[in-house]
Image (cartoon, rainbow, N blue to C red):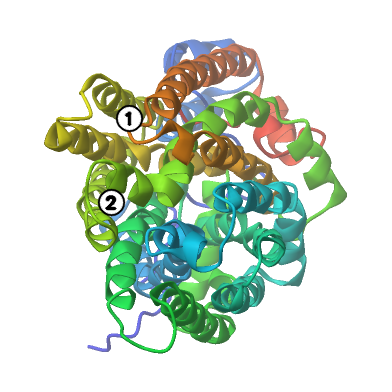
Amino acid sequence: MSSTPSEKDIPIHNEQAHHRIHDENALHYEVILEDVQVEQLVTEVQAVDEARANELRAELASSSQQGYHPITPEEKIAHDRLNRKFDLMVVPFTALIYLFNGLDRSNVGNAVTNGFITDLNLPANAVNTATTLFFATYVPCMPISASIGKKVGQSYWLGIISLCWGILTLGHAFVKTQGQLIAIRLLIGVAESGFFATATSFIALYYPRHNLALRLAFFYFAFAIAGGFGGLIAYGCFTINGKLWGWQYLFIIEGVISITIACIAPFWLPKSPGTAWFLTKEERHYAEKRMIIDSASNIESTGRLSRRDILEACMDWKMWIMLPSNIFATLGPAGFSIFFPVVVKGLGYTGAIANLMTVPPYVIGAITVLCMSYSSDYFRERTVHTLIGVTIVIIGLALAIGIPLENTKGRYGGLVILLMGTFVSTPITTAWIAGNTPEPGKRTVVLAINGWGNLGGIIGSEIYIPQYGPDYRYPLTVSLIMLCCCWLGYVVVHLYLRLTNMRRAKLIARMTPEELERENKDDKRYADKKLTFVYGL
């Protein structure tokens, strides 16, 4: 038997599967079943005959879970096979780019432990100033860069921007003055600004919403281990006996590798599931169709960025409510990726060993985010998993604050617990936002604006400064307060979404099948604004 799948091998939405694409006489809707009974909905439809009522009942029963789900054994096999291919070809390469993005973000902190400031006779606050100004270009340029990526093609844009920051990372090795350091950090902020939104939006093109969090976790895993991996690279570079300082070798090696990966990216990454070079014709067709069904939309999307996408994104209340919580949540990874080596050094470890001691917490954090994201996808739940991650960070911060500085092992243990939960919220909340924004164009803008959560990096760079060392109790306390506010913010978002789902369910219960069909086909209400769209919780 041939291993190449045929049309029969990919039985997407056949007549027996509830995901079939309806013809013009079928019902086009998905329904929130929470708090609304199927029989109640059926009895309220007065203008349908028995056959139509039976059809309605079947539709409601099939809509108990939002998004795409394979039903038949054959469809599940095809679904899993397609996911495996994307898992091998798309996620690892984007994660590799993100790894070096994380290294380029944290290598200045590693360089400080090897005499970067003293070798160049820089002011004590030079790195803090440069890091803050990095975010001054990084944050405002996010939506602009991500929008450009949507216009020119996200796979191409990922290669272009990673090439730019690779060249700029290499340039760090030849910095002589504080002005040059600030200039290069401003430019690298522009180069890196659109990466996260572009990459996460790109990955979201390939996976249904309930398969997305784990893939984003694998992607974010690269950033989580970047701190530890960067510590290993820094340790090796700082032991090189050559004509250059150890920190110069660090910037050169990481810059060259980033440039090499960037040159490969446009040839490796496909533009979309429908153009993936590693799929068969039938698999490409299936990949596109399952994403149409997952978006719960009967209006064909162009996949391009429109003015309406931008306006809808800017007026999306969910994003503006969640953004402050994301800012507070990113204070942990943003601040610690830069200054964790310095904090560990303050606990009494020497320069090279301080970098080496950063490895275990990041590895533990990476494992934690994978486990939590797998659980989030498996149970199709976002809020509780996000809150668990934030709670772990709060516990770690409390321990790091309460344990005396003299208790080096205890304080280090507190930092390990802190980093266990630090990376959990980002991939899960990103999957949460992406799943609740079905239109690709709007999703790109929403994820880009959500990237303003990196404002936490500005806070981190300003509070994790040497004057608060060696215990860093003040910045740790500020972080603790912000994480508590973050926890409450996610609860508020959850309650708003739940109330919206309940309100829509009541409206749907009073609508006839014809009204539901018009609601689903009419573009007056857009994407997730449709009454038939169910928000994931």
Residue type at mark 2: give it.
Tyr
* Picture layout, residue 40 above or below residue 326: above
- Which of the pair 254/521 is nearer the observer? 254
Rendered image: mark on residue 362 = 2
State the residue position of label 1: 393
Residue type at mark 1: give it.
Val
Left-right relation of 143 to 71: right
* Picture layout, residue 241 above or below residue 189: below
Q: Which image quarter: residue 363? A: bottom left
- Which of the pair 340/215 is nearer the observer? 340
Rendered image: mark on residue 189 = none
Q: Is residue 213 visible to the viewer in this orientation of the structure?
A: no
Q: Residue at x 86, y 49 (%)?
A: 307
Q: Residue at x 55, y 64 (%)?
A: 288
**Residue 136 in picture, x, y percent from top left:** 71, 47
Q: Is residue 158 visible to the viewer in this orientation of the structure?
A: yes
Quadrant of the image for the C terminus? Answer: top left
Quadrant of the image for the N terminus? Answer: bottom left
Left-right relation of 319 to 70: right
Left-right relation of 82 to 143: left
- Which of the pair 396/112 is nearer the observer? 112
**Residue 217 in picture, x, y percent from top left:** 37, 51
Q: Which badge, 1 or 2, comes first in the chain's sequence?
A: 2
Q: Residue furthest right?
A: 307
**Residue 13 in picture, x, y percent from top left:** 45, 55
